[in-house]
Image (cartoon, grey):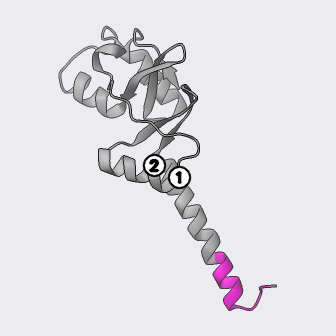
Amino acid sequence: MTVTPDSSVYDAIKTMAERSIGAVVVAEGDEVLGMLTERDYARKIVLQDRSSRTTKVREIMTDSVFYVRPEDTREHCMALMTERHFRHLPVIQDKKLVGLVSIGDLVKDVMSEQKFIITELERYISGEHG
């Protein structure tokens, strides 16, 4: 889920496609330098008719990185994504990348929780509770 700033955009996009993800973190060692998203690719390569094979990730990456910590709530992550129009956020702990969360991940989590609550309420209403 990481690429180096000197990777070609083509290789980064290939990595995203292979892993079915819409973004990768750009890092050198443990230092997070930025993000490369499908949106970056569409706007800065496709629409500008540039070559993904000869363009380096550093040339088109988003270098102002907002991130969350593992202890941040789902609501905090969703609020940050909504406010900043992000679809992905790196998860950083002790200055190290530990994950990448997407808006899709968060929505699935909310839906799962709501399904559980509905099931419990249905059980309660039908008298199946303890």
From the image, tell me which residue sits under label 1: 73
Q: Between residue 113 and residue 66, name the one nearer to us.
A: 66
> Three-letter amino acid code at disc 2?
Cys
In percent of width and height, residue 114 lies at 56, 69
Q: Is residue 73 above or below residue 34?
A: below
- Label 2 sits on a secondary structure element that is helix
What is the quadrant of the C terminus in the image?
Answer: bottom right
Q: Which mark is residue 85?
A: none
Prevailing secondary structure of the magenta residues: helix
Q: CA distance from mark 1 to mark 2?
A: 6 Å
Is residue 113 shown left or right of residue 120? left
The residue positioned 45% from the left and 49% from the top of the image is 77
Q: Is residue 125 magenta?
A: yes
Looking at the image, residue 15 lies above or below residue 66: above
Q: Residue at x 40, y 13 (%)?
A: 5
Q: Is 88 part of what is drawn in magenta?
A: no
Question: In the rendered image, which quarter is residue 42 located in?
Answer: top left
Q: Which residue is mark 2?
A: 77
Give the residue at x 23% y 29%: 43
Q: Where residue 97 sits: x, y (%)?
A: 55, 27
Q: Residue furthest left?
A: 48
Location of residue 94 in the rendering, given as x and y in whole percent from the top left corner: 58, 28
Cβ atoms under marks 1 and 2 closer than 8 Å: yes
Question: Which portion, as a residue range, is magenta?
Answer: 119-129
The picture places residue 127, in percent across and down from the top left corner, at: 75, 91
- 7 w.r.t. 129: above or below: above
Name the amino acid type tagged 1: Thr
Q: Left or right of 32: which side holds 98?
A: right
